[in-house]
Image: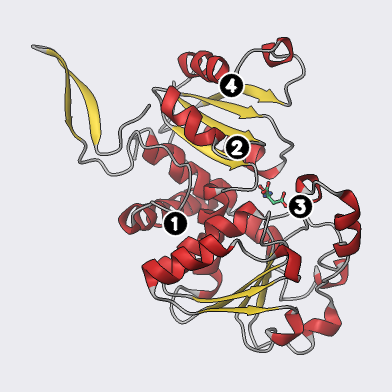
């Protein structure tokens, strides 16, 4: 239940008082990118850059010594959970949590609300991934400490969107860059978070997907309405590869399909390989939130196009930035 814009501050003389929070991101929740102000995004980019330099120098300040991050992962995760863990440990903090509900009281039927209430009292900040849309917002309403969404169903994955933006900024800059979001744009929560950030910076937005996996119409409409930007839609990557600077490829989200035979029809329907990249615009980079299954051929890995592993590595400085900003230790 953090209150963006306000902080509760203890004054020795007169107890607790609520004051206007002039400290930017401190105590905020990060649930989507939809309502994230540009000044907050700029702050996160700046702080991520600083964290990257600390990491490269091997001299990371122990800004979060004594703080505890709780990771509540109700869905599988490799990068999000481990990069948040790494970020917290690098900054001198500690981590507790669970990955999968086995061994927790959720197995006994405890509600999400009660679980969040408890975990909140054991930690200073929570990162949560859950299969239900809206679960991160619910957790944020309950917890007193900041809640960061690590993905809520097929809705949003805001910290992935932020590290996607950071990767584009580092690799291509943020001026006049043309981006294609490719693959499962219906269930791919990372694209739902990233598209708002692309629009915020006025980057070119191209959507490439099979007809049944198009970006939800309400997102496209909302972005066109609020940013007045042009969004172009395509069915195949070969239509855009010679035109764009970034191919952002996603996995078909098999676990979100209600009808698995539908998944079977789409599996393997798009693939980045050397043949496709033979037509690429000079300097094009291929990004992917990972894990990839078959949508990027391993033959691309050794080429200058492949940025997906660097992309994943940027998760640590970006998450260090988020943890330090939300905990007010910068
Ligand atoms: C993504 C996710 O969980 O939405 N993974 C990640 O966090 N890097 C993408 C995916 O699972 O396909």
* Image location of residue 27, percent across then percent down: 34, 33
Residue at horizontal 48%, vertical 79%?
230
- Label 4 vs 2, first from the N-terminus: 2
Q: Classify 10 Å Cα crowding around label 3: few (below 14), some (14-19), many (20 and above).
A: some
Residue at horizontal 39%, vertical 22%?
144
Q: Classify 10 Å Cα crowding around label 4: few (below 14), some (14-19), many (20 and above).
A: some
Q: Height in image: 231 above or below 295?
A: below
Q: Is residue 91 visible?
A: no
Q: Which residue is mark 4?
A: 112
**Mark in the foreground, 3 or 2:** 3
Whether label 3 lies within 8 Å of ligand 1 gets the answer yes
Q: Which residue is mark 2?
A: 86
Q: Is residue 114 left or right of residue 3?
A: right
Cα gap from disc 1 to disc 3, whole angstroms: 31 Å
What secondary structure is found at the residue carrying circle 4?
A: helix
- Label 4 vs 1, first from the N-terminus: 1
Q: Is residue 105 left or right of residue 202?
A: right
Q: Which residue is mark 1?
A: 49
Cα gap from disc 3 to disc 4, whole angstroms: 24 Å
């Amino acid at each position: 239940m953090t209150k963006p814009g306000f902080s509760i501050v203890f004054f020795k003389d007169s107890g607790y008082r609520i004051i206007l929070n002039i400290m930017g991101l401190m105590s905020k929740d990060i649930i989507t990118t939809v309502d994230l102000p540009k000044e907050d995004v700029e702050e996160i980019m700046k702080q991520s850059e600083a964290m990257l330099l600390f990491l490269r120098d091997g001299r990371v300040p122990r800004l979060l010594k004594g703080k505890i991050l709780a990771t509540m992962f109700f869905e599988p995760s490799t990068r999000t959970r481990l990069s948040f863990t790494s970020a917290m440990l690098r900054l001198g903090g500690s981590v507790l949590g669970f990955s999968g509900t086995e061994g927790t009281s959720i197995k006994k039927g405890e509600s999400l609300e009660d679980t969040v209430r408890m975990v909140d009292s054991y930690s200073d900040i929570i990162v949560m991934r859950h299969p239900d849309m809206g679960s991160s917002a619910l957790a944020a309403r309950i917890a007193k400490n900041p809640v960061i969404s690590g993905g809520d169903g097929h809705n949003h994955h805001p910290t992935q969107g932020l590290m996607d933006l950071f990767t584009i900024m580092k690799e291509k800059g943020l001026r006049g860059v043309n981006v294609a979001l490719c693959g499962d744009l219906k269930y791919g929560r990372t694209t739902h978070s990233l598209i708002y950030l692309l629009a915020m910076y006025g980057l070119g937005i191209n959507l490439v997907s099979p007809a049944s996996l198009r970006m939800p119409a309400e997102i496209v409409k909302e972005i066109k309405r609020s940013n007045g930007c042009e969004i172009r839609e395509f069915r195949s990557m070969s239509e855009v590869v010679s035109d764009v600077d970034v191919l952002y490829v996603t996995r078909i989200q098999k676990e979100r399909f209600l009808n698995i035979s539908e998944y079977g029809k789409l599996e393997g329907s798009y693939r980045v390989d050397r043949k496709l990249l033979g037509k690429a615009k000079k300097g094009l980079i291929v990004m992917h939130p990972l894990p990839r299954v078959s949508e990027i051929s391993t033959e691309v890995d050794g080429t200058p196009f492949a940025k997906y592993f660097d992309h994943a590595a940027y998760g640590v400085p970006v998450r260090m930035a988020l943890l330090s900003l939300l905990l007010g230790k910068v």
